[in-house]
Image: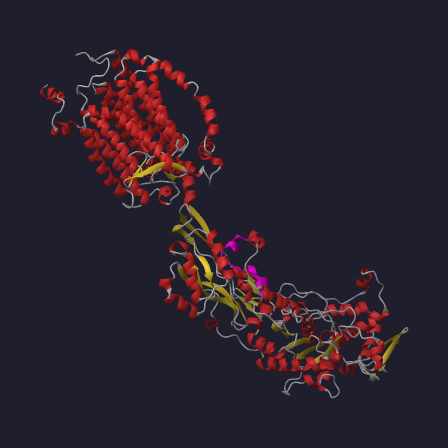
Amino acid sequence: MMQRRLWREASFDLTGKILQINWLYVLLLCGLAGVGYTALYSAAGGPEPYATRHVLRFAAAVVMMAGIALVDIRLIARLAWPLYGVGVALLVLVLKMGHVGKGAQRWIELGGLQVQPSEFMKVALVLALASWFHRASWERIGNPLFLIPPIIAVLVPVGLILKEPNLGTAVITAIVGGCVFFAAGVRWWKFVLVAAPIPFAARIAYDHLHDYQRARIDTFLHPESDPLGAGYNIIQSKIALGSGGMWGKGFLQGTQGQLDFLPEKQTDFIFTILGEEFGWVGSVAVLALITLIVLGGMLIALRCRHQFGRLVAVGLSCNFFMYVFVNIAMVMGAIPVGGVPLPLVSHGGSAMIMVMVGFGVLMSVHVHRDVEFAGAGDT
Amino acid sequence: MRRDTRRTGVFTRRALLMMGGQAAVLGALGARLYQLQVVDGGRYATLAEENRISARMIAPPRGRILDRYGTVVAGSRMNWRALLIAEQATDVQATLDGFSRIVPLSEHERARIDRDLHRHRRFIPVMVREFLTWDDMAAIEVNAPDLPGIMVDVGSTRMYPFGDKLAHVVGYVAPPSEADVADDPVLSLPGIRVGRAGVEKYHDVALRGRAGAVQLEVNAVGRVIRELDRQEGVQGEDVGLTIDAGLQESVVDRLGNESASAVVLDCRNGEVMAMATNPSFDPSLFNSGVSQQQWVEWTRDRRTPLINKATVGLYAPGSTFKMAVALAGLEAKAITPGDHINCPGYLDIGDTRFHCWRKGGHGTLDLKGGLKNSCDVYFYEVARRTGIDKIAAMSRRLGLGVELEIDLPGQRAGLVPTREWRMSKGHPWNIGDTIVSGIGQGYIQVTPLQLATYAARLASGRAIQPHLTRKLGGVPQPGTQPEDWPPLAVAERSLHVVREGMWAVVNEPGGTAPLAKLPDPRWQLAGKTGSAQVRRVSRELRESGKFDSEKLPWEYRPHALFVAYAPYDAPRYALAVVVEHGNAGAAAAAPLARDIMNEVMTRDPASRTEPPVSQVAEVKK
């Protein structure tokens, strides 16, 4: 009891905060990064050039995450909308002067660092929505007019990301936003109202998609129609996973991965290396680890005593969950391929940093779960 | 402090719902993976193996062609090549420029290299230049640091040590055509060659061998990672010829610059000791592709260097045909050796007068005299009495105007006319046609190989067939003994008279070919001259006395022919020489025949034993 009262203080001491970080959860993240090290080691047939850098980057990211975890959650809440503004500005910037990668403008360079504004945007959007709903009572949430600003707050970045064009991330962003709406208590029927026209909208959108996006959907529906073209990735990826069998071919023994049949194996298709070399058992073990991380994030949300923290934790957990789901479903050929890496496993610095920023904020929610942070109707 | 508002309650419910949803979705991914990896795993494992393993064939080494003593007449030679691996070169064009300063590359070559570089992946070596000399190699090696990406390696190419001297017998190899590749997938291998002419073509399948196979692990772009399994191919069989390469060389040299051919046979068994055709060509040029310029030069040459005159060249046999006419008459009992026929210099048949080559005629001659003097009137009369069909039947029995069993591709059968043949062309047979056939003119066309076979059959009395293959894959081929060949169905008495006539041609005073007499008195040569008109000489021109074939343009001069065998008393070798547009056989062909036969008798290849196997570098490794 003594301790608890202490932490209700506006500024409990640093050591106490560090102890409050959920180190078990950090251990889970380290486990996933270790899976990434193994897969990247195999992808290159040695520690260079991916695996070692992956670990060093992760070590730096953990320190950064711990730093963010110590930042008062109320300060983060206050920064939510400014950060959202920065995110939108970066998205506009990337459209104006972004680097083109695979036919899309997705990243810009800031101070020698590659930044994918869409990744930053997802975290900023979760914060902004959480801070909006933090102040909303149950009654106000029922008011449709109250929902208009946050809907716009979702649509602006989603539209900008679509324009990059990055369909996969745009959809993830929209769904993550929807999750926050849902957790905030927006009425069921309103979701039905929004979701109902989607099939029709999708039909119209399909006609306005870029050719490469349409090709992606077409080859997803019929991958064998173009085995050496756009369908090649999906087919080779399924062969890699499938040939792994129950127990896998063994570390560094995966023929598909080692012989370069896998496309982009160190980034988007990293999961197939694991599936090929460690079989179904290995795949499911990784899935279990990911499930623990997702549900752990949700538990942090449940244990939080203020609405902002709850919504942030739900949003960030959903973000991580969506990442994983889209990536793994993609490499299994269950949904159309999109440039979505497997967080903490795939090679790539900027994606990892933003994921770890998200976990830092999540951890800050955990550390500050009991702070006095009254929103509307909480008293 | 009451925090549990309705909002919090809803949040908790919904958060738990979402957790359930997330767990369910991740579980579904696991289930889908079970389907993919465990249920369908076998199918995907097969697909992965198919991805990984690439079966390739290994080109078998081509068999050699050897002469009768085991001398290599077609073999393999190291081919030093410069290759370029694009991914190892910092700047491909700079490397090629540097290479060009050492070994100049033509613009044509540069274009081909660029094309190959674009066509292949960057790690696949592209041929820059082959058949490098030792000096070029040394220069490239010294400058290797300045030529990143250039690699020198050794391949194998067909080598013909006797070059143009045996080209028409051995033939040549060339890259296979697309039609060839459809027949045998081995031919799709890089660097493989197929026989296109001569023995190379006739024994192509035996020489080619059987391809080996290698199973390679390859990556997605086809780079070979390692070798999984290897089955060596079977080297092509060596072909041993009946040819004596040394004799062949000297025969070719003796023919000199004439457009001529000569065939030497072992008259007891039909082994071809030499088969020379001049002019010839360098067979190795076909290996890498003949230049346009060279091709034009060959095809425009009226002495036809690409054509094997010995088997394809068709000539009227002229007076060399007279032995066949005589034998046909004797066997048909139309004449006897003692029958005397008067030659006044011409023979009138109906209102046509047929001239003897000798103005004023030979007077009265018997058969031996007719041959010795090559009297045309004598053989006009024999032909008239015998009839064309019996002459044709005898000619064919002697090997003229029929396809022989020579083991070379593309021989021509020639023609000995019959009434039936003439009728099939829509014309009746005239008696005049029979008369000119009596001296080997008219429609008759034969090859030098047929003439040599004819001489060998006259000498041996056996229906030998000329052949070139003595051993195949080290196994002796049948037909080396005289007993392997059936006797000619001609009475020995008749043959004896004809042989006597041929002996007299050379050895008796007054014979038409005294120049053919061998210098060594131990050996006596029997032979017969022939001149084959290539253009009909008009009666007016002949009678005006101004006809002189020496003054005709080269291509209108008659061909000079000579058939012979030796020694007369125990025949071993038969010979036919044809000098295109050489005028009279006695003057142009007889001295050649004498020198060639003298060389043959001196070497006596049929009596020489083969060197021991160890010196021949036997077939199998």
Relative image position of residue B23 (x, y in whole percent): 31, 24
- Would residue A196 be found to the left or right of residue B292 on screen? left
**Is residue B605 in view?**
no
| Residue B161 versus residue A273 in the image, above or below | below
Magenta-drawn segment = B184-205
Q: Residue furthest right?
A: B351
- Would residue B291 be found to the left or right of residue B419 on screen? left
Quadrant, the C terminus of chain A: top left
**Is residue B582 in view?**
yes
Chosen colour scheme: secondary structure
- Would residue B156 be found to the left or right of residue A101 on screen? right
Relative image position of residue B380 (x, y in whole percent): 83, 75
- A310 is within the stretch colored magenta: no
Relative image position of residue B279 (x, y in whole percent): 62, 73
Q: Based on the displayed image, in which of its 4 quarters is residue B27 positioned? A: top left
* Residue located 26% across and 11% down the image: B6
Q: Based on the displayed image, in which of its 4 quarters is residue B352 positioned? A: bottom right
* Residue located 40% across and 31% down the image: A163
Which of the pair B258/B241 is nearer the observer? B258
* Residue located 53% across and 76% down the image: B609
Quadrant, the N terminus of chain A: top left
Which of the pair B299/A255 is nearer the observer? B299
Relative image position of residue B35 (x, y in whole percent): 39, 30
Which of the pair A130/B200 is nearer the observer? A130
- B193 is within the stretch colored magenta: yes
